[in-house]
Amino acid sequence: MPSPLSKTKSATRRTSRSERPAEGSAAPSSRFARAGARMPELAAALRRLSALGLVTGARSRKVSVRIDPGVLEAASKELGLTHPSDVVNASLALAAAPDRFKAWLRGTQDTLPDDFESAV
């Protein structure tokens, strides 16, 4: 007869972070979601990425990068986020979301004349 301890031990095996279900599965963190509520562009980017099936809600991919502190601080202020992971996620969502203007801008060879003045 197996020992109750061995049964309990195997049943309560700790799982690695990558095996654990994401909190709020398929939804961004609450800090990240609040930023989307304040920034319509971020909310729209997340909707477009979700529609393409690219937003998983899992925050399991660990990336180690060196970032210019000034750029991180500026992005943090612009997005209204303080946690570096949220700043990076929001920045990547804004950069990755399909957008007709971004596609046009990347594809065009047109330039504005030197004497161009914005009407705004």
Image (spheres, rainbow, N blue to C red):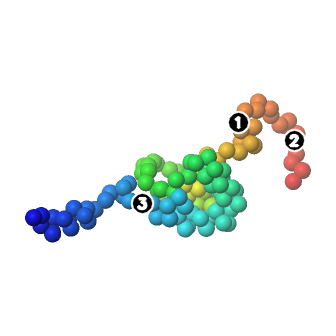
The residue type indicated by label 3 comes to Pro
Q: Residues within 10 Å of mark 2 (few under 14, many from 20)?
A: few
Callout 3: SS: loop
Label 3 and label 1: CA atoms lie apart by: 38 Å
Q: Position of residue 103 (x, y in %)?
A: 71, 38
Quadrant where the image shows the N terminus: bottom left
Q: Quadrant of residue 104?
A: top right
Q: Nearer the viewer, mark 2 or mark 3?
A: 3
Residue depicted at x 66% and y 66% = 37
SS for dot 2: loop
Above or below for 110 versus 36? above
- The residue beneath circle 1 is 106
- Check disc 2 and give the amino acid type: Phe
- Kind of residue at disc 1: Arg
Residue occupied by mark 2: 116
Left or right side of 93 for 63: left
Residue tagged 3: 21
